[in-house]
Image (tube, helix red, strand yellow):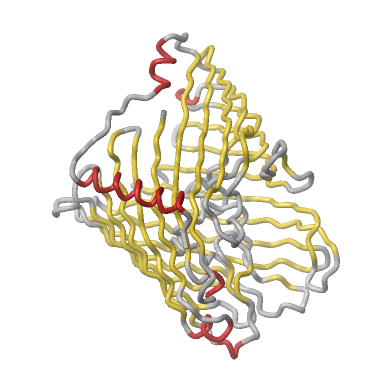
């Protein structure tokens, strides 16, 4: 059962949602406003507070394996901009979890005050020429399915990186060398030597009317991996492909991405691929401006776990929450996902979203992985079946004012043949209530 703190956070979140629904709008004043009035314009302080009460039932699809807790996050920002071509930025972050039971916390849930970002940026982005950014920073490419800051997670993600952005007209190129920062509560967060990501990401606008084409090449290396035979090895793999998104008129939108992978883990060969395709329709003149979208997602799996050939797609460093269901129990590996989404906007502050997913395994000799890329359910082979299950999600988002927003939702997984045979087979439920305040 949830602890008292968690229950209190759920009640507070529901109270905010109710207040927003009745039109009560707390003021948008923030402490940083008064502080910044006393400072030169080239020095700015700011911050963010976020609280999220969440829980789950039937973790591992096992009845009775449940918990609830409160995730708490504080960020403090300092920006120094003495000229248009020089920016210094630092961000401290403190993240904690309260009220949990006996289950392990999700990754990135707790880390006492540490340096989340700290970088120097040379160049004037408004002039769209050359910008250099060096230091601890976020990396967000396109829709973040391959590389993103994972802001949903309590601690989120940053990289120690050097990044160059070259832009000329409608063409942009991002080039970077980075290493992901590992959160360690109680000590200064650092990256792991040899765990590197290098990349080239292009953006070409106007090549096709109302669309953007984005070719990319990402190179990942990592130590301390294991071959399929269990021998220590190094990962050395490239991910390459293209993303294409745009609109047809004012009503239809589309996005497609196809990515291939090639490389090695020691003596094992890596050959994998993934893709997704989205088609959406928005009724701009209809009441509540509904948008209906259909998406198909595929991530390859491993056909034989002992043949020295790795076929499971590596999702790299994604921001994956909600892309395959908000319960985050199924990710972009060894999966076929059929996804329907309906969004409505009753007014300028509210957005309501409903999602339906149905999943099948790509390879009958591979298991199911969560959005973090962790193997969640192992397989005994084809006898376990192909259909994984279904998920139904409902979420509500409300912007109370420019500084304060609240959200809440619930996702439920209904096991299919595979989960009923390869796991205990109970339905998994994930509820949450969240508050964001920028100060």
- Foreground residue, 145 or 172? 145
- Foreground residue, 422 or 112? 112
Residue 334: image location, x then y, percent: 58, 72
Quadrant assignment, res 121? top right
- Foreground residue, 53 or 308? 53
Work out which residue is located at the far right of the displayed protein and give it. Answer: 231
Q: Residue at x 45, y 40 (%)?
A: 50
Residue 277: image location, x then y, percent: 43, 63
Q: Residue at x 66, y 34 (%)?
A: 162
Residue 249: image location, x then y, percent: 25, 52
Q: Is residue 366 above or below residue 253?
A: below
Q: Residue at x 56, y 18 (%)?
A: 86
Q: Is residue 231 above or below residue 315?
A: below
Work out which residue is located at the far front of the displayed protein and give it. Answer: 4
Residue 100: image location, x then y, percent: 54, 55
Is 349 placed left or right of 219 in the picture?
Answer: left
Quadrant assignment, res 241? bottom right
Q: How many marks?
A: 0
Which quarter of the rendering shows the C terminus? top left
Q: Is residue 368 above or below residue 107?
A: below
Q: Residue at x 49, y 85 (%)?
A: 417
């Amino acid at each position: 059962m949830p602890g008292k703190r968690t229950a209190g956070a759920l009640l507070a979140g529901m109270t905010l949602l109710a207040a927003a629904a009745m039109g009560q709008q707390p003021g948008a004043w923030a402490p940083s406003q008064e502080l910044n009035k006393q400072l030169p314009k080239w020095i700015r302080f700011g911050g963010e507070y976020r609280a999220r009460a969440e829980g789950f039932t039937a973790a591992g699809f096992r009845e009775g394996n449940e918990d609830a807790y409160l995730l708490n996050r504080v960020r403090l920002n300092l920006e120094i901009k003495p000229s248009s071509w020089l920016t210094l930025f630092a961000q401290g972050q403190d993240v904690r979890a309260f009220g949990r039971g006996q289950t392990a916390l999700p990754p990135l849930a707790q880390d006492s005050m540490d340096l989340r970002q700290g970088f120097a940026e040379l160049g004037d982005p408004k002039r769209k020429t050359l910008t250099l950014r060096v230091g601890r920073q976020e990396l967000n490419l396109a829709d973040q399915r391959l590389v993103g800051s994972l802001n949903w997670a309590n601690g989120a993600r940053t990289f120690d990186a050097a990044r160059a952005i070259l832009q000329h007209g409608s063409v942009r190129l991002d080039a970077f060398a980075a290493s992901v920062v590992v959160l360690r509560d109680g000590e200064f967060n650092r990256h792991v030597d040899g765990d590197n990501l290098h990349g080239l990401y292009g953006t070409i606008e106007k090549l096709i009317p109302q669309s953007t084409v984005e070719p990319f090449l990402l190179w990942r290396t990592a130590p301390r991996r294991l071959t399929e035979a269990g021998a220590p090895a190094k990962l050395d793999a490239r991910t390459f492909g293209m993303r294409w998104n745009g609109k047809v008129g004012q009503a239809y939108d589309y996005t497609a991405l196809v990515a291939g992978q090639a490389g090695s883990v020691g003596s094992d060969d890596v050959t994998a691929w993934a893709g997704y395709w989205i088609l959406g329709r928005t009724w701009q003149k209809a009441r509540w401006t509904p948008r209906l979208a259909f998406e198909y997602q595929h991530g390859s799996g491993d056909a034989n776990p002992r043949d020295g050939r790795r076929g499971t797609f590596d999702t790299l460093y994604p921001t994956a929450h909600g892309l395959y269901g908000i319960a985050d129990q199924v990710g972009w590996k060894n999966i076929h996902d059929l996804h329907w989404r309906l969004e409505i906007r009753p007014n300028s502050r509210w957005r309501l979203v409903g999602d339906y997913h149905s999943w099948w395994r790509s390879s009958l000799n591979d298991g199911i992985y969560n959005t973090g890329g962790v193997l969640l359910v192992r397989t005994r082979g084809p006898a376990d079946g192909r259909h994984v299950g279904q998920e139904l999600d409902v979420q509500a988002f409300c912007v109370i004012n420019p500084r304060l927003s609240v959200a809440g939702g619930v996702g439920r997984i209904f096991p299919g043949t595979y989960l009923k045979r390869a796991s205990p087979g109970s339905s998994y439920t994930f509820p949450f209530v969240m508050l964001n305040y920028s100060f």
